[in-house]
Image (cartoon, rainbow, N blue to C red):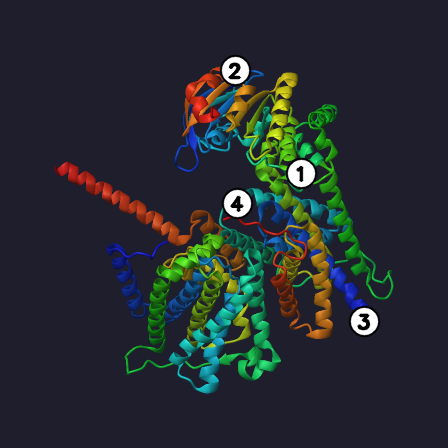
């Protein structure tokens, strides 16, 4: 039984649907990536999962519980950490306060302290800047903060919306390496939405290709990497 | 010189009241970007509650405490029952909703308690305890306001709930994604604002006497103070309140007389805003095309 | 955005409305004529305010001030200078145009709540200024000025009230026609563009400052014309007739009627003229509470104003009419 199972999902903003009959799944402790060009509907998929998009058809279930019709706050509390596009940093709060907001739904003091140390271990730069206003952090640091904030929930599934966006290649590699570690060590499943296909396919086990709101190809990440059409359009070699 | 100092000190006392009201306005503005025009009438209604309790024989500070708590729930209820339903409406619709709340509260208070002016007691002694320039009540008002400020600061700075409210005010979507019940945070903000307003009302009532229209001028100064300090900045609201209070008093005493002091004070504030459109301590707007 | 294009049905509706408005003073009592006369006056003011706030996006909580200026210009001209009543209306409009245009300059620097506060300050200050001792010779101080009701001209066989109503109706029709022309033209489009996308409008070559100050002027002109007519109708001006509540009522009028809608101002004018009376009849003890409940009810039931609601119902009626007609044709064939 996969951790997240989406089948036949359609939905959008206002009256028009952006997503059409989208199906995919994320295994327990697995990494799934959804690839696609700008505007293909990748962000909309993540928003639909978190109850932020009108769903007109289909079903979404997480750990054998239905997600359809639930409030965003409730979905998050079920164990889904969402790192939104634009990172959603609280710019006027300090780094540490941002992380405390991430842990807002928890009451186990000891566990929270442990997780502080853990994310500071992954991203030592955040520890250096922990009393600094988050608005003064660099783009890469803010991305690290956004991932860390989501981890503070102790999620079973992490939704990542274009973590590489607008960052220097070295920083991106760093972040992807740590995502691998997080997945290995904590068994957190990851649903990664990316434009940077080569990095995403390297990290993921399963991959889906989205074009204008429809899944046009799916399979193990290794297979998609070899596929002629994916290589030409998304990997560029 | 003595008269001048006296004017300054009593201006500070008024300013502390404007500052409290401005703070209540900022609290609601920060999370919802609404200016609650009914804030003054909510405070007035709360003050009547306190008056009724004191009249029924409750000791002052018990009545004070009960009023603050009751006001919290009234504010919370107004948010959950009325304001929530129009949360996404255009700003002018909201202005009309707040005006409706204002006239309803005003009219109902007049109906229950009549429009006759009532004396509201001060908890502070008659004789001046802090030198010749400031009455005990004025000093008490400043003291109470400072305590309120300190408590609010501690609450927002050091408690998890305070942090959740600050997070909601800054970025509601991100807060939702962290599992914060944003709707409740907004309602809590209304409750807190109503409590702060209630304290301002009980502090000002011994000075202006109790009547259903007692807060209209004070709310205007409160709005002016909040805007002058920068409507998204609690610290600015307090400084703005004190400036407005002193300015108003000195204007009335030395420049234009009491008849035109409201006009002149407002003109001055607008003058400041024309040169500093986001207020003295406000953040600058970033607009995208 | 209604009123921008004219089709046949709309012309018929407008024609019927105008006809009813013409016949009204001959079928109702003189007090009602007086009340409907005020509806016309308010409609003119609301039209101006809607141009500024609804179409151009500049909020004003102080239009009562321009209304007051218009009223006082008319009263002073009639009482102190012996000018005939009809000549005071354009003069009041002109004076207010200049005043509004000038106020438009500081308003350029203020947005949203800040502009609301500045205009509200204007509205609050006006009674204090009118009471000011230095101006008492002209304004009559707290006492105000009493003016005489004009007679119907050309020996027309109508009462003074009826004549004043018809005069107001002529003025109102002219002002509506003028507004309609302004709003559907280049300036009207520029006004809306500035409201929706100020920076893009600037980039498109619209002189934002000029359009905004001009709109403020025109809007004040409407308030001034309304004020002059109002003074003549009520036959009396005094500082306490122009308290801040008047400005708030005007804003309520355009929101309840429908923002950025020409027809909406008529509904708004009817609301601010009659609903306070109705509220008073419902509860003598707490009339304003009833008024407030009315406001909430309107906002909840017609979030886009009465004009928006009418348009919605009209659209539904039209659709169902077309459906039945289509069904009939299929049945016949």
**Mark 2 and mark 4 residues within 8 Å of each other at the beta carbon:** no
Residue shown at 44%/36% (left/top)?
A13
Identify which residue, A74 or C192, lies in the foreground.
C192
In the rendered image, residues at marks 1 and 2 fall on the same chain: yes
Parent chain of label 4? B
**Residue B135 in view, yes or no:** yes
Residue annotated with mark 1: A137
The residue that label 2 is drawn on is A2
Q: Which mark is residue B3?
A: 3
Tell me the distance, in whole angstroms, between the alpha carbons under discs 1 and 4.
33 Å
- Mark 1 and mark 2: Cα distance apart in space: 37 Å
Give the Cα separation between the discs numbered 1 and 3. 52 Å
Relative side of B222 to B131, left or right: left
Q: Earlier in the sequence, mark 3 or mark 4?
A: 3
Q: Residues within 10 Å of mark 3 (few under 14, many from 20)?
A: few
Tell me the distance, in whole angstroms, between the alpha carbons under discs 3 and 2.
80 Å
- Reading the image, the residue beneath label 4 is B87
Report whether mark 1 lies on the same chain as mark 3.
Answer: no
**Circle 3/circle 2 CB separation < 8 Å:** no
Between residue A47 and residue B219, name the one nearer to us. Answer: A47
- Where disc 2 sits, the SS reads loop
Q: Nearer the viewer, residue B31 or C267?
A: B31
In the displayed image of the protein, which residue is found farthest to the left?
C333
């Amino acid at each position: 039984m996969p951790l997240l199972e989406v089948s036949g999902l359609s939905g959008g903003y206002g009256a028009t649907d952006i997503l059409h009959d989208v199906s995919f799944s994320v295994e327990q402790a697995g990494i799934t990536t959804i690839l696609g060009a700008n505007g293909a509907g990748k962000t909309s998929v993540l928003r639909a999962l978190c109850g932020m998009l009108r769903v007109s058809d289909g079903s979404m279930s997480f750990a054998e519980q239905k997600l359809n019709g639930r409030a965003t706050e409730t979905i998050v509390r079920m164990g889904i950490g969402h790192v939104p596009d634009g990172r959603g940093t609280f710019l006027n709060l300090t780094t540490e306060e941002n992380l405390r907001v991430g842990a807002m739904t928890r009451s186990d003091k000891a566990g929270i302290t442990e997780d502080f140390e853990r994310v500071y271990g992954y991203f030592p730069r955040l520890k250096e800047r922990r009393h600094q206003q988050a608005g003064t952090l660099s783009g890469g640091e803010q991305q690290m903060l956004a991932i860390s904030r989501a981890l503070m929930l102790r999620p079973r599934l992490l939704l990542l919306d274009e973590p590489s966006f607008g960052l220097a290649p070295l920083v991106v590699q760093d972040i992807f390496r740590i995502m691998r570690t997080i997945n290995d060590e904590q068994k957190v499943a990851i649903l990664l939405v990316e434009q940077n296909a080569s990095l995403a396919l390297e990290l993921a086990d399963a991959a889906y290709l989205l074009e204008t709101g429809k899944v046009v190809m799916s399979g193990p990440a290794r297979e998609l990497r070899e596929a002629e059409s994916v290589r030409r359009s998304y990997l560029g070699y | 010189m003595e008269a001048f100092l006296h004017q300054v000190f009593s201006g500070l006392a008024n300013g502390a009241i404007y500052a409290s009201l401005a703070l209540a306005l900022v609290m609601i503005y920060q999370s919802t970007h609404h200016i609650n025009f009914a804030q003054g009438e909510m405070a007035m209604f709360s003050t009547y509650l306190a008056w009724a309790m004191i009249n029924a024989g409750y000791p002052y500070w018990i009545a004070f405490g009960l009023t603050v708590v009751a006001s919290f729930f009234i504010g919370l209820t107004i948010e959950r029952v009325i304001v929530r339903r129009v949360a996404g409406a255009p700003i002018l619709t909201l202005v009309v909703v707040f005006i409706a709340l204002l006239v309803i509260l005003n009219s109902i208070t007049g109906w229950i308690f009549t429009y006759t002016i009532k004396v509201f007691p001060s908890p502070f002694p008659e004789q001046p305890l802090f030198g010749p320039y400031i009455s005990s009540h004025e000093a008490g008002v400043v003291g109470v306001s400072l305590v309120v400020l300190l408590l609010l600061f501690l609450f927002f700075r050091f408690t998890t709930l305070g942090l959740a409210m600050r997070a909601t005010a800054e970025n509601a979507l991100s807060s939702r994604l962290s599992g914060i019940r944003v709707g409740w945070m907004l309602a809590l903000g209304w409750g807190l604002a109503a409590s702060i307003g209630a304290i301002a009302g009980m502090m000002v009532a011994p000075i202006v006497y109790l009547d259903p229209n007692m807060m209209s001028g004070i709310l205007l100064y409160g709005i002016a103070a909040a805007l002058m300090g920068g409507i998204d900045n609690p610290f600015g609201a307090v400084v703005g309140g004190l400036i407005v209070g002193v300015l108003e008093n000195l204007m009335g005493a030395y420049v234009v007389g009491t008849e035109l002091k409201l006009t002149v004070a407002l003109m001055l504030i607008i003058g400041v805003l024309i040169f500093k459109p986001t207020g003295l301590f406000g953040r600058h707007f970033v607009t995208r095309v | 955005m209604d009123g921008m294009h004219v089709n046949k049905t709309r012309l018929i509706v407008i024609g019927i409305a105008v006809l009813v408005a013409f016949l009204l003073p001959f079928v109702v009592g003189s007090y009602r004529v007086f009340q409907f006369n005020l509806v016309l006056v308010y409609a003119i003011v609301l039209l101006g305010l809607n141009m500024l706030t609804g179409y151009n996006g500049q909020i004003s909580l102080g239009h009562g001030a321009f209304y007051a200026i218009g009223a006082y210009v008319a009263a002073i001209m009639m009482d102190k200078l012996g000018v005939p009543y009809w000549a005071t209306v354009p003069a009041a409009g002109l004076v207010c145009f200049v005043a509004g245009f000038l106020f438009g300059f500081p308003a350029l620097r203020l947005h949203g709540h800040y502009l609301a506060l500045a205009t509200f300050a204007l509205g609050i200050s006006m009674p204090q200024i009118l009471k000011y001792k230095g101006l008492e010779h002209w304004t009559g101080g707290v006492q105000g000025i009493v003016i005489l009701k004009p007679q119907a001209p050309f020996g027309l066989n109508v009462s003074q009230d009826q004549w004043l109503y018809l005069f107001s109706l002529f003025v109102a029709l002219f002002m509506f026609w003028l507004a309609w022309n302004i709003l559907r033209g280049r300036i009207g489009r520029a006004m809306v563009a500035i409201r929706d996308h100020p920076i893009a409008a600037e980039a498109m070559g619209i002189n934002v400052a000029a359009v905004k100050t001009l709109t403020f002027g025109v809007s004040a002109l409407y308030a001034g014309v309304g004020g002059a007519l109002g003074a003549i109708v009520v036959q009396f001006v005094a500082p306490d007739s122009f308290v801040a509540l008047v400005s708030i009522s005007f804003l309520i009028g355009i929101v309840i009627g429908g923002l950025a809608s020409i027809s909406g101002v008529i509904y708004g004018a009817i609301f601010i003229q009659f609903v306070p009376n109705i509220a008073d009849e419902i509860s003598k003890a707490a009339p304003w509470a009833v008024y407030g409940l009315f406001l909430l009810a309107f906002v909840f039931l017609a979030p886009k104003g009465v004009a928006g609601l009418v348009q919605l119902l009209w659209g539904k009626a039209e659709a169902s009419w077309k459906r039945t007609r289509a069904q009939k044709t299929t049945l016949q064939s």
